[in-house]
Image (cartoon, grey):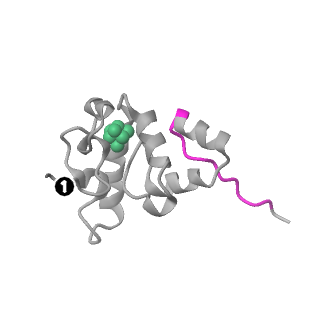
Amino acid sequence: MEQQRPGAPPAHRRDPWRERAACLGLPLELFFGPGPQERGNARARREQAALEVCALCPVRERCLAQELSLPASAQFGIFGGMSAAQRRAALGQSPAAAARVIRTGRSPVRRPPRAA
Ligand code: SF4
């Protein structure tokens, strides 16, 4: 039986909706990077390219909702138009705020603390 790579982007997994994923057929490295050797600008450029794919994806909401159903410790890679850090932040939100994040694909806004 074929093994699926853990953390593979949705198009690399098996669910009917994934057949419409914009990442279908794209390399895993675009969403996860080549490994720990990736640094700074190279990572930022790759992540931006992945986010641009997600921005055009017709199943982005569903993808993000599914990824947010995972615990924060399982959040890595680009999914649903958000980075892992953005999704971890969304997981710390109220259910209503998390639903808004899924609907809009926008990272939760964190206001800086007020100066005393
Ligand atoms: S939102 Fe991004 S990661 Fe999710 S299915 Fe679409 S292209 Fe793939």
Residue 108: say if magenta.
yes
Where's residue 24, x and y in %? 23, 38
Position of the C terminus, as image quadrant, is: bottom right
Ligand 1 shown in quarter: top left
Q: Which residue is drawn at 43% across and 60% down?
A: 74
Q: Residue at x 30, y 57 (%)?
A: 32
Q: Residue at x 29, y 31 (%)?
A: 16
Q: Relative to residue 19, is residue 10 depicted above or below?
A: below
How busy is the neighbourhood of tag 1: few (under 14 within 10 Å), some, or many (20 plus)?
Answer: few
From the image, tell me which residue sits under label 1: 3
**Residue 19's quadrant in the figure?**
top left
Looking at this view, is 103 or 52 the one in front? 103
Q: Relative to residue 58, is residue 41 depicted above or below?
A: below
Looking at this view, is 50 or 24 the one in front? 24
Query: Which residue of the protein is positioned furthest toward the right in this rendering?
Result: 116
Looking at this view, is 36 or 97 the one in front? 97
Query: Which residue of the protein is positioned furthest toward the front in this rendering?
Result: 1
Q: Relative to residue 75, is residue 53 depicted above or below?
A: above
Mark 1: which amino acid? Answer: Gln
Where's residue 26, x and y in %? 20, 43
Residue 52 appears in the figure: no
Where's residue 7, x and y in %? 32, 55
Q: Which stretch did the figure color magenta? A: 103-114
Residue 76 appears in the figure: yes
Where's residue 31, x and y in %? 30, 51
> Looking at the magenta stretch, what is its main secondary structure?
loop
Mark 1 sits near ligand 1, with its Cβ under 8 Å away: no
